[in-house]
């Protein structure tokens, strides 16, 4: 059974349809990625799931039952735009947000101290939030999201503004929580992270879901005519080859799509013939980024045609 | 209404406000401001700006001159050289000449003036005042009584009247106020109740405005800081609003109780014997009503201030959107102040019952006159009814506004929020 099912959610702000008939399923014990550009409708969707916004239409089901306010105590939330009471002390802040989730007492206090230690902030327990660096405030914010041991964890762009060490620490904790059987919802525009961490994804663009499902399945579906090439030099000549459907540059690597699987060897031949130094040649491989660009990109083109 | 979440929020608000330095500061500061402003007002009233006034009193006869001089030299403001007075005797013909000679001096110096006392004062009490500032009320009120005494004395001098009769004729009229209360007691009214009425009005006005501003800023801060999104992932916007309002209200009532403790001690004990003119006719029930009224006033006004805070995402915009509520506090404040002139007028009656203004006007009114019970009950009932109307509306605006940032919404948009179903 799915932990959460989102069915036909829609929400408009004035004339703008921010979320348009969005549906997806989030399985138990997994990391789910809600992926899209800034302004695609991710945050609005998340807010509706938590009943912060009320939707214009559609429903959300929690383990088969229509979701209600009880979900609020089961969920930990790290919003994209972070904020804490500046004048409040670190430990008081943590305990207050846990209390709002219905958790009080010694267990919470103990856990709070443990997390502070893990994030290397134990000596700041009695500092005021405003005296902390921005990165440290981020860490406190993350602890407020997980301190009450939620069944669901919703993280909106969790890695923005964190240094690599703390990014890794965060990833570590997220994976731990997955091990513990929690459901983690990751909203991000960073395809790399999503690709490495998520079991399932939904891609959202301009308020609409353009792709959703199990990540491996999706990649397999899109990868069979795709080659991921990492090479030094200019690969633009490939576009002129008759068997090539499409070449896309991602800086150091290129996504190459052939018209049929049987042409993959021809690509390799052509690269060698043009004296290109190949660092990596990965047949039947596609990155989430490529999938996203191919899907969202087409849509942009379609729109342009309509305007014409 | 009092869910666990609301209580958690109330607790935080109390920690934030009640246990803060600013609470102690405000609790001390507001009475200080109040006494300072009363003090300043009294001071300003006493500065007539007539320091160094030079008067030349020209009398038509020696007799008048002598008596006036005798009377004037007794006056404290002349004794202390605060006013400088010269005395001359001139016939009316000579006076005309004297006046022409001194015209230039009078024009150039507003402190200089000439009072001409003709002999005819003994029939009509009319004196002439020459100055470039011919309507000088402070001076007139200072000189009117002493001159009157002189004229009365001279007028009755040859008329075989006893000193007592003359004394009677010299005395002005003195109004003594008596309060008639419902239980048909007749009590001499001191200024005590007037002072308390002013105290009540001023405290209500100041603390509603200040606590309201604080509430608004706290909502704007939460919105601006985006804390509100995390809070709303845990509690509903309604719980958040109620928790914040109740937290501030409890703080406010506690503060008011501290301010009123001297009054409570005064009326409930006989430890302090007040001078008769300061006696208070106020009972514990009225003080309780005042606190209850303040409690409801805070709920009402703070919900309005919170709503304004939720509409705007920065202090400046919020300040500009706050004027309707400020008016809602200021107009009743001025009505309440006007009560000291005549507490029993139609405007006061209506203003002490209708919602919003009753919160400020009723306390001032019941300290000054006996208010029938039905008026108390009606005003409370209306206050409660208003709360039931504005709380859901405020909640709606709050829920939508609290998450909107960016462009400042127009009032029209805000009214549209009210029409949304949830």
Image: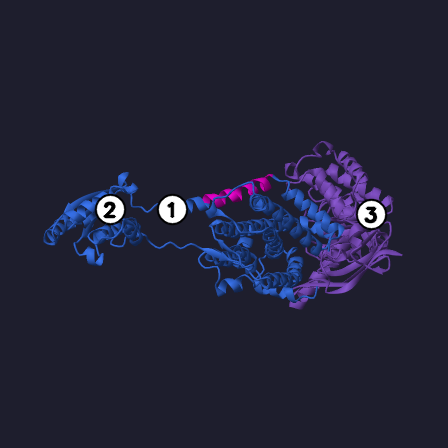
Q: Which chain is purple?
A: A
Q: Is residue B24 magenta?
A: yes
Position of residue A178 relative to residue A119, above or below, is: below
Residue found at the very far top of the displayed protein: A123
Nearer to the camera, B20 or B219 = B20
Instruction: Name the residue tied to disc 1.
Output: B44
Task: Identify the chain of the residue marked 1, using the numbered disc in the image.
Answer: B
Task: Identify the chain of the residue marked 2, using the numbered disc in the image.
Answer: B
Q: Give the secondary structure at mark 3.
A: strand
Q: Of circles 3 and 2, which is in front?
A: 2
Q: Quadrant of residue A45?
A: bottom right
Q: Position of residue B275 (x, y in %)?
A: 47, 44
Instruction: Name the residue tied to disc 2.
Output: B111
Nearer to the camera, B283 or B243 = B283
The magenta-colored residue range is B21-36
Label 2 crowd bin: few (<14), some (14–19), many (20+), radius 10 Å: some
Label 1 crowd bin: few (<14), some (14–19), many (20+), radius 10 Å: few
Q: Quadrant of residue A278?
A: top right
């Amino acid at each position: 059974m799915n932990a959460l099912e989102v069915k036909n959610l829609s929400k408009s702000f004035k004339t703008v349809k921010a979320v348009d008939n969005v549906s997806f399923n989030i399985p138990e014990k997994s990391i789910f990625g809600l992926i899209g550009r800034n302004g695609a409708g991710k945050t609005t969707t998340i807010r509706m799931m938590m009943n912060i916004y009320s939707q214009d239409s559609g429903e959300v089901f929690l383990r088969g039952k229509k979701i209600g306010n009880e979900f609020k105590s089961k969920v930990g939330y790290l919003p994209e735009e972070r904020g804490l009471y500046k004048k409040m002390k670190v430990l008081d802040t943590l305990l207050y947000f846990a209390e709002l989730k219905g958790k009080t007492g010694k267990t919470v206090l103990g856990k709070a101290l443990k997390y502070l230690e893990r994030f290397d902030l134990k000596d700041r327990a009695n500092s005021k939030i405003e005296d902390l660096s921005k990165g440290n405030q981020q860490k406190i914010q993350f602890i407020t999201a997980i301190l009450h041991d939620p069944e669901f964890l919703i993280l909106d762009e969790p890695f923005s503004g964190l240094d690599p060490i703390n990014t890794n620490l965060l990833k570590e904790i997220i994976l731990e929580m997955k091990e513990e059987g929690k459901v983690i919802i990751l909203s991000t525009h960073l395809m790399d992270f999503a690709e490495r961490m998520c079991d399932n994804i939904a891609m959202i663009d301009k308020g609409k879901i353009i792709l959703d499902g199990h990540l491996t399945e999706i990649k397999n579906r899109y990868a069979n005519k795709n080659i991921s090439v990492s090479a030094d030099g200019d690969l633009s000549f490939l576009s002129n080859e008759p068997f090539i459907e499409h070449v896309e540059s991602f800086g150091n690597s290129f996504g190459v799509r052939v018209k049929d699987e049987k042409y993959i060897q021809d690509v390799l031949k052509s690269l060698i013939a043009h004296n290109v130094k190949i660092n990596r040649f990965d047949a039947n491989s596609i990155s989430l980024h490529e999938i996203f660009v191919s899907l969202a990109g087409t849509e942009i083109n379609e729109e342009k045609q309509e305007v014409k | 209404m009092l869910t666990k979440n609301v209580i958690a929020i109330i607790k935080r608000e109390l920690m934030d406000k009640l246990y803060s330095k600013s609470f102690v500061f405000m609790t001390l500061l507001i009475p200080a401001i109040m006494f300072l402003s009363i003090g300043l007002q009294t001071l300003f009233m006493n500065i007539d700006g007539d320091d160094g006034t030079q008067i030349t009193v020209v009398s038509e006869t020696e007799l008048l001159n002598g008596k006036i001089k005798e009377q004037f030299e007794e006056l404290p403001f002349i004794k202390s050289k605060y006013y400088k007075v010269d005395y001359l005797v001139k016939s009316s013909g000579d006076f005309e000449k004297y006046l022409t000679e001194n015209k230039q001096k009078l024009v150039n110096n507003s402190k200089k003036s000439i009072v001409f006392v003709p002999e005819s004062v003994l029939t009509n009490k009319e004196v002439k005042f020459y100055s470039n500032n011919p309507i000088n009320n402070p001076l007139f009120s200072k000189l009117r009584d002493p001159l009157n005494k002189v004229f009365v004395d001279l007028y009755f001098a040859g008329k075989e009247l006893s000193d007592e009769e003359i004394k009677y004729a010299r005395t002005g009229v003195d109004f003594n106020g008596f309060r008639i209360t419902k239980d048909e007691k007749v009590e001499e009214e001191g200024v005590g109740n007037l002072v308390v009425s002013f105290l009540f009005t001023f405290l209500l006005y100041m603390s509603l405005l200040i606590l309201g501003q604080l509430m608004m800023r706290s909502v704007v801060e939460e919105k601006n800081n985006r804390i509100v999104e995390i809070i709303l992932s845990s509690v509903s916007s309604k719980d958040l609003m109620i928790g914040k309002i109740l937290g501030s209200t409890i703080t406010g009532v506690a503060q008011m109780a501290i301010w009123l403790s001297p009054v409570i001690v005064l009326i409930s004990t006989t430890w302090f014997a007040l001078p008769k003119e300061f006696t208070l006719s106020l009972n514990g029930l009225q003080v309780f009503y005042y606190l209850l009224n303040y409690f409801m006033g805070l709920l009402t006004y703070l919900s309005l201030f919170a709503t304004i805070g939720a509409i705007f995402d920065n202090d400046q915009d919020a300040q500009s959107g706050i004027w309707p509520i400020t008016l809602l506090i200021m107009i009743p404040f001025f009505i309440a102040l006007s009560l000291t002139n005549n507490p029993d007028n139609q405007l006061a009656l209506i203003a002490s019952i209708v919602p919003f203004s009753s919160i400020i006007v009723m306390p001032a009114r019941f300290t000054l006159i006996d208010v029938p019970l039905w008026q108390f009950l009606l005003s409370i009932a209306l206050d409660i009814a208003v709360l039931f109307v504005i709380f859901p509306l405020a909640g709606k605006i709050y829920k939508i506004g609290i998450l909107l940032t960016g462009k400042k919404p127009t009032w029209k948009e805000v009214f549209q929020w009210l029409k949304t179903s949830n």
